[in-house]
Image (cartoon, coloured by chain):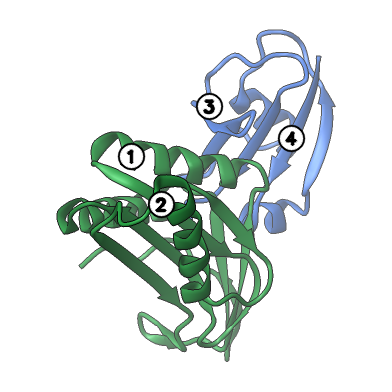
Amino acid sequence: MPVYIKDTVFDPYYEVKQQQKIIESNAGFAQYGATSVFVGTMRDFNEDHKVTSMTLEYYPGMTESALEKISEEAKSKWQILDTLIVHRVGEIALNDSIVVVAVWSAHRGAAYEANRYIMEALKSKAPFWKKEATSNGATWVENNTKYE
Amino acid sequence: MAITVRFFARLREELDIDETQIEAESGITPLMVWQKVTGKSELPAQTLVAVNQEYADADLVINDKDEVAFFPPVTGG
């Protein structure tokens, strides 16, 4: 159930594939029937304003342990085989991947639900802070958008 | 007691403090650490507190060599 913090551009689909190879070599061949993948990407707008780039700050140590705890919580709530969380920090350009969450399980229900649980918990508990650069200067994002 | 105090994001910029060490008497809480370091009596609304990198209440009694952090609501993902 690895957690990675990356300070450079990453390919979420490559990360998922790498973890899947590890699962296949550890858990054995054909042990999962469902993989859910959520990718969060840097947009050029937030609510009502244009955004040109973003800086993501984190709390080294606490951020990783918060993400590990969230992964463990998901594993205790659903029958899942493995999880992966990769989150970007530092300077982020438009269209860069910010986060990928993947969940592997026998069936789709657990894969979908655990993935959503991890994403929502990450957004409300994991210590990350976004500072957006806009045409009017840089401002800290005060609250995450609600799930809709 | 030696306490490490850290601030993140908007609070770090507003206070212009990233990390500092303070000497404190036993029985001190994160709120008292905040008052001692910033000179302000109240924690700003919605401020989150962590002790030794776990979320904690502002009135938790902390120990020698603890790390106390203050930060605004988180906005990752």
Tell me the crowding category of disc 2: few under 14, some 14 to 19, or many 20 or more residues within 10 angstroms, Cα based. many
Q: Are marks 4 and 1 on the same chain?
A: no
Task: Say which chain tag 1 marks.
Answer: A
How far apart marks 3 and 2 lie (CA) works out to 33 Å
Q: Secondary structure at mark 1?
A: helix
Q: Which residue is denoted by mark 3 in the rendering?
A: B58
How far apart marks 4 and 1 lie (CA) works out to 33 Å
Q: Are marks 3 and 2 on the same chain?
A: no
Pick the front one: B33 or A83? A83
Count of numbered labels shown in the rendering: 4
The answer to whether residue A147 is visible is yes
> In the rendered structure, which disc, 2 or 1, sits on the residue that comes first in sequence?
1
Residue at left 61%, top 26%?
B30
Pick the front one: A108 or A92? A108
Tell me the crowding category of disc 3: few under 14, some 14 to 19, or many 20 or more residues within 10 angstroms, Cα based. many
**Left or right of B26, for residue A56:** left
Q: Are marks 4 and 2 on the same chain?
A: no
Tell me the crowding category of disc 1: few under 14, some 14 to 19, or many 20 or more residues within 10 angstroms, Cα based. some
Residue B29 at x, y = what percent? Answer: 61, 19
The chain letter of the green chain reads: A
Q: Which residue is denoted by mark 4 in the rendering?
A: B5
Q: Secondary structure at mark 2?
A: strand
Q: Up-down: is B74 above or below A39? A: above
